């Protein structure tokens, strides 16, 4: 944990505060099906609209993070999230619930690219896997506590979940406002084309990066089943909200206990191997849920796919940070976040439909198949890349070696090297 900038730890604190109140998304499907009596398909639709809002916000938030600044984007998004989350607890009409859930998706996901870009701005390439792992650790400390506590709060009334979530998001915004400074690199008057902010078109033309985004989307559809299909499946099997809260809370607890030692073990491993291994564990872990019939077995399945998350999450975020030019990190992180947001639209819808029409065995079996396909894709895409060089590393190499003689070849730009991979 040593050697990281002080502002990183304030960001880490804001993330922890935010996730300590992350009640709503985790329990939304259970609230809709058990407390309100809606079908699994409707719960999947609402969760999908949340994901659709997040898909839009991921791209817009990334653009704003590069244009108006990381800090400003985070503050506006967090204040908006607090307001609409509180509102979601009081609307009752099915259409109103769906619409407000979509707004929550927009506001809550708009800050993600800005946060990830700020982390990449603050931390040098050699420490990024460690920094993203620590941030993911904070997310899961908060998630583990909130999931366990939320089941108890829900027993007193679900409205308190929405109000508590809104309050903690507001506190997160206060931490950012008081302690976090802007990190968006300034554009020098003599900046070259490669130093200017990349447009979305340039990001979309980065074929290797977009392939990474596509594979992440496939994995994301599997990962979404933990917050939607799993809760409905357990509810239909007669398990209570408190039991589901304890089972899903194990996810956060395991990350808290294992993220640091596992990250140390990951040092020096190739990105392809890490992402493939993590993806297989996630896909097969969810697939094991088809055989679950007790709280203990459900807990075992959560343990398996949580190990996959621990391996996959920091490695994937570090790869994205290394691929992105400094002033385009918001756009690259936004496009990467789009994969998860789009998955949070498709995943719950597909999971709810499969559960209603084909049963749990088909839904969980599909998770294992999709996870295997995504793992093979990661391995194929990144197997030739022992490490990922970033634009920062390339610049350092040029500075150490000194200027290229006039008679020699011109140095390749970061963008040119990146597009040739």
Image (cartoon, grey):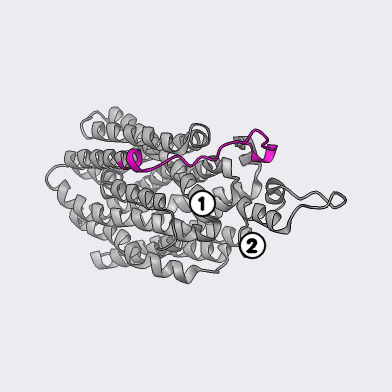
Residue at position x 25%, y 31% in the image: 87
* CA distance for labels 2 and 1: 18 Å
The magenta region covers 175-196
Report the residue at 68% width, 48% height from top: 414
Density class for disc 1 (Cα within 10 Å; few <14, some 14-19, many ≥20) is many
Residue 178 lies, in percent from the top left, at 32, 40
Which image quarter: residue 240? bottom left
- The spot of residue 407 in percent (x, y) is 88, 51
Is 160 placed above or below 6 here? above
For the stretch drawn in magenta, what is the main secondary structure?
loop
Mark 2 / mark 1, whichever is N-terminal = 1
User: Which residue bears the numbered disc 2?
Assistant: 385
- Residue under label 1: 216
Number of numbered labels in the structure image: 2
Location of the N terminus by quadrant is bottom left
Disc on res. 49: none
Viewer-side residue, 204 vs 298:
204
- Residue 52: image location, x then y, percent: 43, 36
């Amino acid at each position: 944990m040593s050697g990281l900038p002080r502002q990183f730890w304030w960001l880490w604190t804001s993330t922890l505060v935010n996730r300590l109140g992350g009640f709503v998304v985790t329990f939304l499907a259970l609230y809709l099906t058990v407390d309100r009596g809606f079908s699994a398909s409707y719960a999947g639709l609402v969760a999908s609209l949340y994901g659709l809002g997040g898909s839009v916000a991921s791209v817009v938030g990334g653009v704003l993070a590069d244009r108006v600044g990381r800090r400003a984007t985070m503050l506006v998004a967090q204040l908006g999230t607090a307001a609409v989350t509180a509102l979601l607890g009081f609307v009752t009409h099915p259409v109103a619930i769906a619409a407000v859930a979509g707004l929550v998706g927009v506001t809550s996901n708009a800050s993600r690219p800005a946060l990830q870009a700020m982390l990449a701005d603050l931390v040098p390439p050699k420490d990024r896997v460690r920094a993203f792992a620590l941030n993911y650790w904070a997310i899961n400390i908060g998630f583990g506590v909130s999931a366990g506590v939320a089941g108890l709060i829900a027993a007193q009334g679900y409205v308190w979940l929405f109000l508590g979530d809104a309050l903690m998001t507001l506190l997160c915004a206060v931490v950012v406002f008081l302690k976090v400074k802007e990190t968006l690199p300034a554009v020098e008057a003599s900046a070259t084309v490669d130093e200017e902010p990349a447009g979305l078109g340039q990001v979309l033309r980065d074929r290797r990066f977009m392939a990474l985004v596509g594979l992440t989307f496939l994995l994301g559809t599997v990962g979404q089943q933990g917050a939607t299909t799993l809760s409905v499946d357990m509810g239909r099997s007669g398990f209570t909200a408190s039991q589901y809260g304890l089972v899903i809370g194990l996810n956060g607890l395991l990350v808290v206990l294992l993220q640091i030692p596992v990250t140390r073990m990951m040092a020096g491993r190739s990105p392809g191997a890490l992402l493939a291994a993590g993806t297989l564990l996630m896909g097969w872990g969810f697939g094991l849920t088809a055989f679950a019939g007790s709280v203990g077995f459900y807990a075992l399945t959560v343990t398996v796919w949580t190990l996959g998350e621990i391996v996959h999450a920091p490695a994937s975020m570090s790869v994205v940070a290394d691929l992105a030019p400094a002033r385009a990190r918001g756009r690259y992180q936004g496009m990467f976040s789009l994969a998860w947001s789009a998955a949070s639209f498709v995943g719950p819808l597909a999971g709810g439909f499969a559960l209603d029409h084909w049963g749990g065995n088909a839904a969980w079996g599909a998770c294992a198949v999709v996870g295997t396909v995504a793992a093979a894709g990661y391995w194929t895409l990144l197997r030739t890349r022992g490490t990922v060089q970033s634009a920062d590393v390339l610049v350092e190499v040029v500075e150490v070696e000194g200027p290229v003689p006039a008679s020699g070849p011109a140095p390749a730009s970061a963008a040119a090297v990146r597009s040739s991979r």
